[in-house]
Amino acid sequence: MPLKLRPKDVTYLKKGVVRQNWSPVTLYNLTRLAKQRTNGRTFFQQKYAAKQETRRYHGEHLTARQWQNIFRHSLKSVVPMNTHELASTDGSEYGAGRGSGLDGVERKYIPPVPYMNQTYAPMERRLDMAIFRAMFASSALQARQFVIHGFVKVNGKKMQYPQYMLNPGDMFSVDIEKVLFATGAPKGLPRSIDPKWKAKKKGGSASAEEDAKEGAEDAGSKEADAKPAKAEATKEDTNSAETEAPAEAEAEEQKTEYNKSKELSSGKDWWNDPNRDKIFDPLKPYRTPWRPRYYLSAFAFIPRYLEVNHNIGHAVYLRDPVARPGQSEVPTPFHQETMQLAYAWWLRRR
Amino acid sequence: MPPRIRLPTTVAAPSRRAALTSPAARRTLSTTPARRARESGDAEDDNVKFDKNKQAVENFKSWLRGPGENFKKPLYYEMNYISSYDRKTWQRVGTDKDRMNIPFPLNPAFRSHPVLSEELKEEIYLRIMGSGRSVRSVSAELGVGLERVAAVTRLKAVEKQWIAEGKPIATYLTKALHMMLPVTKLVAEGEIQPFHENLQDIPSHPLSHRQAFVPVSESRVFTRADAGKEFGLPPAEEVVPHPDLIELHREKSYGLDLNERIDKQRERDRRAAARREERERKAKAKRRERGQLIEKGRWVWRLKEATTGAVGHRYGVPHEDRKKGQIKIPTKVL
C-alpha cells in the first residue's frame, strides 16, 4: 500500500512534531524525539520551547485560553502502602532515635515521584482525550469529531461536548462501528477482486502495459459492480477472504503464516473469531473482513485510570490520573525536564 | 519573535565540507537516493538547491522501509513499542518485561500497564452477579482494585445485555488488541491469582503536603497514628481501601487458626453490610422528606408545600443563562 503524505505531514516530518495520533509519521518522529536543548538559551526561551513542543501533542486543537482554564497547579499522587508492613509495624521506626529513624537500618530505595509528568493531567479528563486513550479513536481530533457528530454517550445519554470533563465513575461509549473504523485498516478491495493485485499476479505472463490496461478496466467494472453485489461478493469471497491480508511477496506470506501459528497457540486468535464477518462488505467504511490497522502495536496501551471493554466500545473513567513513586499515569512522550519547563510556563501568572 | 526549535534529525544536513571528501568515501556513506544523486559529483547537481522537505520525506520513507517494518504488524506474543528495540541497530533488546513496557522512550515513568483478560473479567462478573459476593471481597481475592472491579461488572452487564438483544459484539477487536497489550491472565483453579495492581494506594491528601516539625521527647514512641493526628488525618491503616486485609494479617501473626479468622472476617462483613443498609435507609428517608418526585420525559419535578410570599429570594427574577459567558456544558451526567 503506497503511503500518501499530505503537505501538512511533510511539515510535521521536517519539524519532528509528535502529535496525538497513530500515524507512521508520528511513530518516526517519536524515534527522533530528544530532550529539550537548554544550553545557550535563556530560561524564558527554554520554557517557551517546551510549552510549544508539549502543546502540539497535548490538546493541539485547544486554544491557550481553553487549556489555561482547566490547568491546575496542584498535581495528584498516591502513596502505595504495603499490607504486610502496615500490619506488622506501627510506623514508629521512621521516627526512632533522633527523629529520622535509626542509623544503619537498611531502607528500600523509593524512586522519586515524577510530579512534573502530571502537568497535562487535567487534559486527560476531557471526554475526547479519554476516547483516544481508550483506543476508540485513532487520534484526539477524530475522537473530538466522534463526539460532535453524536456517536458518543456518557452514562447512556448523548453528549455532544468534547470538552465535557469526566467525573470518576462515568461510563462513556462510542458507536462500535466507529471504533472498528478507527482501529481497522482503511477501506480496500479484497485480493480476489482488487484490479491492482490481479494485474500484479498476471505480471509474470503478460506484458506490463497490457496488465495496466486490464487492471484499469477491471477497476471500472468491479467498482461499479461492488455496491449492489454484496450478496454475490459474499459467495465469491468466503474463500478468498482467508487470504485477504495484503502481503506484498511470498516471504511476507510465510511470515504471516508463522505469526498466525504463534497467535493461534497464544489463544488470541482474532482471525478465526466467530463474531468476525468473513465477507467483503462494500458499505462498511473500513476494510472488510476487519483487521487492525498497520503500526497500531507501537501505540497500543490503555492507561490505568480507564477500564475499557472493546467488545462493545464502552469504558469507565475510574479516577483522575495520578503519579506514584517512579511512575506517572499521564501518557506523554516528552522527557521529564521538558515537562518541568512546560509546567513552569503554565504556572507563570498563577 | 518566538525562539525557534531545531530538533535533531537522524541524518544530518549535508555540510559544505562533505563536498571536499573523496567520491569513493561519499558513495559508501550515502544511504538515500537523493543524497547519492547529490553527492555523485556531477556539475549540474551542484546547482540543485537543497530541499529540506524532500530530504525529510526521503529520510522518513527509507526509515519506514527499514526499521519501520518492525512496527507494521504486531508481534503476536508481546508488546512492540519503540523502546523494545535498540535505536541504533533496530534489534530487539532482550525479553526484560520492565524495559519492554515503555511506549515512549523518553518517558520511562509512563508504563503500559496490563489489562484484564476476558476470562478474568468474566470471573469477576460471575463472582459478583452470580455468587452475590461484595465488590470488596472480590477485589481482595483477585488482586484487582475496588473501582476496577465495579467498572468491570458494569461493563460486563452492558455486554450481556447486548448479547441478549442480539447486537453484534466485536470480540475480535478485543482479541486483536490483547495481542499487542500486556494482559493479566486468570490462573488455573487452586493457584494464587497474582496482583493486577497494588490494592492499598492512599491518595496523597493536600493537608499532608506541609512539612511539619513536631518536638517530641526521645523516649516517646511516635507512631503512624500520631503523625496522622498532626496533619488532621486518620491513620494510614484506616484510610487504605482494604483495612480488613491488615486486620487479617494481624490476626494471622497473633496465631489465630484459619476457622477463627474466617469467623472474625464474617463478623466484620456482617457489620459492614449493616452499616451500609443503615446509610441507605437514612438516605431514602431523606429523599422522601424532600417532597413528591414526578419524572416525565426530559423533566423531573419535585413537588413541595409552599406558601405565597415565602418561596425564595429569586422568585420572579429572570435566569442569567442567556448572558454572555455563561457556561452551559453539563458538569455531570447522572
Image (cartoon, coloured by chain):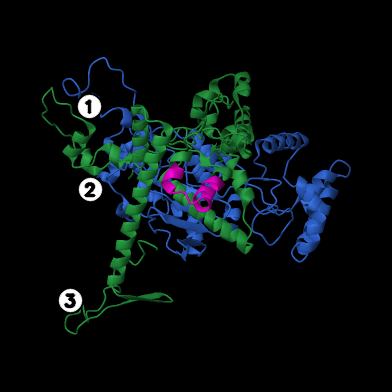
Q: Nearer the viewer, mark 2 or mark 1?
A: 1
In the rendered structure, which amino acid carries the disc numbered 3? Answer: His
Indicate the position of residue B136 as horizontal and vertical percent values: 41, 45
Determine the main secondary structure of the stretch shown in magenta: helix
Q: Which residue is mark 2?
A: A349
Residue at the (35%, 57%) spot, across then down: B277
In the rendered structure, which amino acid carries the disc numbered 2? Answer: Arg
State the separation of the CA atoms marked 2 and 1.
42 Å
Q: Which residue is mark 3?
A: B313
- Asked whether B41 falls inside the magenta stretch, the response is no
Residue at the (78%, 36%) spot, across then down: A250
Span shown in magenta:
B121-139
Report the front residue among B123 and A205: B123
Mark before the other along the chain sequence, 2 or 1:
1
In the rendered structure, which amino acid carries the disc numbered 1? Answer: Ser
Q: Mark 3 falls on what kind of element?
A: loop
Q: Are marks 2 and 1 on the same chain?
A: yes
Q: Which residue is mark 1?
A: A92
Residue ranking furthest to the bottom: B308
